[in-house]
Amino acid sequence: MLKDTFGREFHYLRLSITEACNFRCQYCLPDGYDGPANDAFMSIQEIDTLVQAFAGLGTSKVRITGGEPSLRRDFTDILSQTKRTPGIHQVAITTHGARLERFARQWQQAGLDQVNVSIDSLDPRQFSAITGQDKLQQVLKGLDAALDAGLNVKVNTVLLADFSAARLNRFLTWLKTMPVTLRFIELMETGEHADFFQAQHQSGTPLKSYLENNGWAPISRDRSAGPAIEYQHPDYEGKIGLILPYSKDFCKSCNRLRVAANGNLHLCLFSEEGIPMRSLLKEGNTTAVQAFLQEALGNKHASHFLHEGNTGATRHLAMLGG
C-alpha cells in the first residue's frame, strides 16, 4: 500500500493524459491552449506501465484528466486498458462534456464508471462568457446521455466573485429532478492567474453554512472519494458537494496522487515541481516505478501552501486537471 510519513494511504490516482483543451475557461486557459501536441505526452504503453505500478501498490481508482482527455485519439483505448488492469475497480474522467452526447455509451462500454463535467452556470450567456464556448445545451444533452448510459455523473462549478443567489437558486431548482452531484469548488490560485484569483476568489464557507441551515445533511465519505464534503436533502434528486481547499485540515484526508501528461509525479496539485519518471515508464519496468513511488512519498508534505500564496509548479489547472 502507498502510504506517506503522515499515515495517509493513497488509493486514488489522478492521471493527466494531455494538457490540450479547446475551451477557454476564464480561470484556466482564457487565451486558449498553446502548448505541446499530444505526441509529447505519455504513450498508451507508458500509461499502462504507470497504472499497473499504482494498482500493484493498492490504488483502486483512476481519474483520467487533461486538459480535455477526450482530445486524444486513443482515449477510448486508454479507458479500456485502465479498467482491465487488475486491482483497478473504478475509472472516472473529468471533461468539459461537449463530446459526451456522442460518446457516453461507447466510453461506458470501454470501462468508464464516473464522469465529472464542468458547468459553471446554467445561463447560456454566462456559460459562454466563462468558457469561451456557446455549448451549454450540448453539454446538458451530454449529461443526459451519460445518465442514460448508467454512468455516475458529477458536475463541477467554480465559485467566482459574481456567484449570486440567483445562480445558486437556478442550480437548486435544477437539482430537484436531476440525479447528479453538483460540486462547488473554491477558486484556487495558479501561477499564471494570480491577478484573476485576487479579483475573483470567493470563500465557500458561507455556502456550507447555508446548506447546513437549510436541511442538507452530510454524507459519509468513501475511502476512494475525492476531497468534496457531500450533502443530500430529502426533497432533491441531486446532491451537493463542496471542495474548500483553503479550509482548515483540507489536506488531512488526502488519498490521491497526480501524474502529469509528461510523466512527472506530483505529490500535490501545488507541489513545488513535478518529479520526472518518464525514463522508468519508457522501460516498462513496473517494479522500478513502484520503488520510485514509495521513495518519493517520503517527501510529501502534510499540506499545500496555498494559504501562503505558494502555487508551486502549477501554472494553470489544465496542466494536471485540477
Image: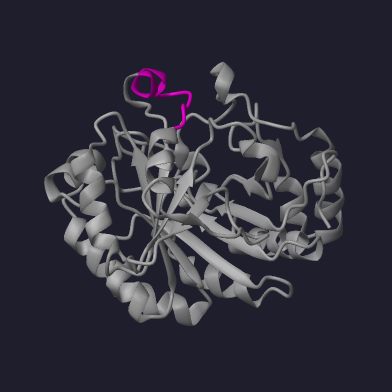
- Could one spot residue 226 in this view of the protein? yes
> Does residue 231 show up magenta in the picture?
no
Report which quarter residue 194 is drawn in.
Answer: top left
Looking at the picture, how far across and down is residue 237, in whole percent? 34, 69
> In the image, is residue 40 above or below residue 176?
above
> Does the magenta segment cover residue 197?
yes
**Residue at x-position 25% and y-position 43%:** 131
Q: Position of residue 159 (x, y in %)?
A: 35, 37
Q: Is residue 310 visible?
A: no
When the figure is inspected, residue 212 is found, relative to residue 34, above or below; the finding is: below
Give the number of marks. Answer: 0
Query: Residue drawn at (42%, 36%), measured in percent from left and top?
Result: 204
Front-most of 107 and 214?
Answer: 214
Identify whether 293 is placed above or below 112. Answer: above
Left or right, 287 with reference to 209: right
Residue under the image location 59 percent in, 45 percent down: 260
**Residue toward you, 127 or 281:** 127
> Looking at the picture, how far across and down is residue 43, in whole percent?
59, 58
User: Where is the N terminus found, in terms of image quarters?
Assistant: bottom right
Find residue 297 and report its image quarter.
top right
- Viewer-closest of 26 and 53: 26
Between residue 191 and residue 234, name the one nearer to us.
234
Q: Position of residue 319 (x, y in %)?
A: 50, 40
The colour scheme applied to this rendered structure is: one colour
In this picture, residue 138 sits left or right of residue 50: left
- Range drawn in magenta: 188-198
Q: In the rendered view, would you say 182 is above or below 164?
A: below
179 on left or right of 126: right
For this view, does 41 lie left or right of residue 33? Answer: right
